[in-house]
Amino acid sequence: MTSQVYEFQAQARQLLDLMVHSIYSNKDSFLRELISNASDAVDKLRLEGLRDKDLDADISDLAIRLTPDAEARTLTVSDNGIGMTRDEVIDLIGTVAKSGTDELRRKLAETDAKDAGELIGQFGIGFYSVFMVADSVELVTRKAGESVGTRWSSTGDGTYTLDEVADAPQGTAITLSLKPVDDENAVHDYADQNVLRRLVKKYSDFISWPIRMTVTKQVPADPDIEGAEPTVEEVDETLNSQKALWAKSPGEVSDEEYAEFYRHVSHAWDDPLETISLHAEGTFEYQALLFIPTQAPFDLFMRERASGIHLYVKRVFIMDDATELMPEYLRFVQGVVDAADLSLNVSREILQQDRQIRAIRRRLVKKVISSVQELQDRRPEDYQTFWGNFGRVFKEGLINDQDNAKAILKASVFASTNSETEPTTLVDYLSRCKPEQDVIYYMTGESRTQIERSPHLEAFRAKGIEVLLLSDPVDEVWVSSGIDFEGKQLVSVAKGVVDLDDADAADTDEDKSKRDEQFAPLLSWMGQTLADDVSEVRLSSRLTESAACLVGDDFSMTPQLEKLYRASGQPVPKSKRILELNPDNALVTALQGRFGGADDDHAALEPTAKLVYATAVLAEGGDLDDPAEVAKLLAETLTRTLG
Ligand code: ADP
């Protein structure tokens, strides 16, 4: 087949353009990316070789090789791993399959050029990072088991070329035609053996496959042979120690080494916020090295996102994406688990059933939660970063992990009426509330602003009772699961009857029952008039200013939860809530004054009753069933007042 020219997918072209113009400051990272990919490819071939005994591939000496050529100014990074088919090359190298690319492009469009590098760092660019240091790139690859290989080449402009290669060696070789050295702009001499040796040590020392380079070595003259000359010999040097970092004790590993390892396993470009190292001995022997990232990956909320845990058995890679080892609500955790007693050809199905895996998972989960708790207790700034990026995901555990819900709740923070800016822990909430308050109050809604405007908070504010303001969709679900904290129930200020009356309140019980009696006919008439919309009308003790608000039963859905269900396509029966009136509000007292006796004709008051209900819906940010009718009523009422 002759060579064919292809266009990069549009998204790929844009990312390439960014790379060619080198906005990311750490250009050395291209080597880490290539070695990481090569190491993955070798892992995959080893596994495939175990699975398929007839696979036509040599797995006897798997390795990665660096071949610099100082004269030609090229660097080749090759591996004898799994390789790619022609279609895979088009798919994997010609397009950006990574989810979140659109998001990245959107953000880049809004970002100043000088900050764009940081965004690239957050996103990670993988293979394309070669164009930070190379003018043109050639990739020759042959998929294990196939006879013909593929050559891909590009100068990083809009197109790439594909050729067939009859005698391609096993695996993938990537040759970079290097840009001129420009130390000022951090483009170093990647054709220099010493530079490469240093970079491998720095970024890729822990890679479990040997990273080799042929180096020239001076051999001194043999003193026993007369007239012998010193010679120059070419020898293979392995540049990395291949030591598994997770097997070392934390004291032996520097932060920088951990960070590089984190970047290798996660294919991320940021630093880990927290490193968790676990060595378990006893019944189940295993080692784990886990990381909490600093930055949220772009696809954190995308369903198809892979788990970040790689499973090893006695230092041998078994699988990435080991979802069995980490629950979904901790899907941001990246790292490695090395279990000693699993079989090397363990399958996913076996993993799901395995007692040992379940025991390891339980322990890892507890350890991650306690690490988050430690961040909260000891490193408030880092905790804030964590919470901003992963809090919403972490809270999913309150619904999905009953065993750890209490610990998760303790390690979480929530916005509250106590502070505009600082969220509070529940421990702090309890430390501020009066000893006689035996519940924790909260209100849910779509945003803090919307919740804060809601009339339900009036009496709480007036009495200085702190209320949690919960505005993440996940909050709606976990708060209604009946969870308590230190024996105190979480109670919605928008549900049920609230009894905030304290001993020194002005109203006596007697005053109250007299008032109840007075209002009874009005309440009952309004209940009938608004029967399509509300289940009952009663007097409120949670309002100090507004005329009315809507409250649910202790167990009814909030309007937000109804919206969520509807948005997810589930049928929701129309639930009627209770309309509460504020007996101290001028509109309500006037209405009561006009009402007269139960037997009078109240038709003239109907529009007012309907408008009182409509205002209650609007005040909590709700949607009116029939806004046109309300607008009409309002216009008529206004006309009458003016007339
Ligand atoms: P990432 O590694 O983050 O997925 P890359 O752009 O670095 O993104 O690589 C894209 C894909 O190309 C990889 O996921 C892998 O499937 C394939 N690939 C890259 N390098 C190699 C290689 N040396 N051998 C085999 N496949 C490779």
Image: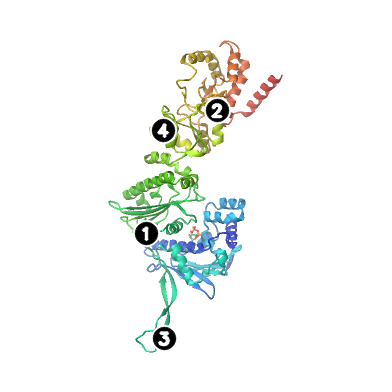
Secondary structure beneath dot 2 equals: helix
Mark 4 or 3 closer to N-term?
Answer: 3
Which label sits on residue 482?
Answer: 4
Report if residue 171 is visible in the image.
no
- Which label sits in the foreground, 4 or 3? 3
Which label sits on residue 455?
Answer: 2
Does the beta carbon of the residue at mark 4 sit less than 8 Å from ligand 1? no
Q: Position of residue 466 (x, y in %)?
A: 48, 31
Secondary structure beneath dot 1 equals: helix
The crowding category of the residue bearing disc 2, from other C-alpha atoms within 10 Å (few below 14, some 14 to 19, many at least 20), is: many
Image quadrant containing the N terminus = bottom right
Residue type pointed to by label 4? Gly
Q: Mark 4 and mark 3: span between their CA atoms?
A: 86 Å
Residue to which mark 3 is pinned? 229
- Which label sits in the foreground, 2 or 3? 3
Is disc 2 in contact with disc 3, using a CB cutoff of under 8 Å?
Answer: no
Secondary structure beneath dot 3 equals: loop
Residue type pointed to by label 2? Pro
Judge by depth and name the residue closer to the eye, 167 or 197. Answer: 197
Residue to which mark 1 is pinned? 252
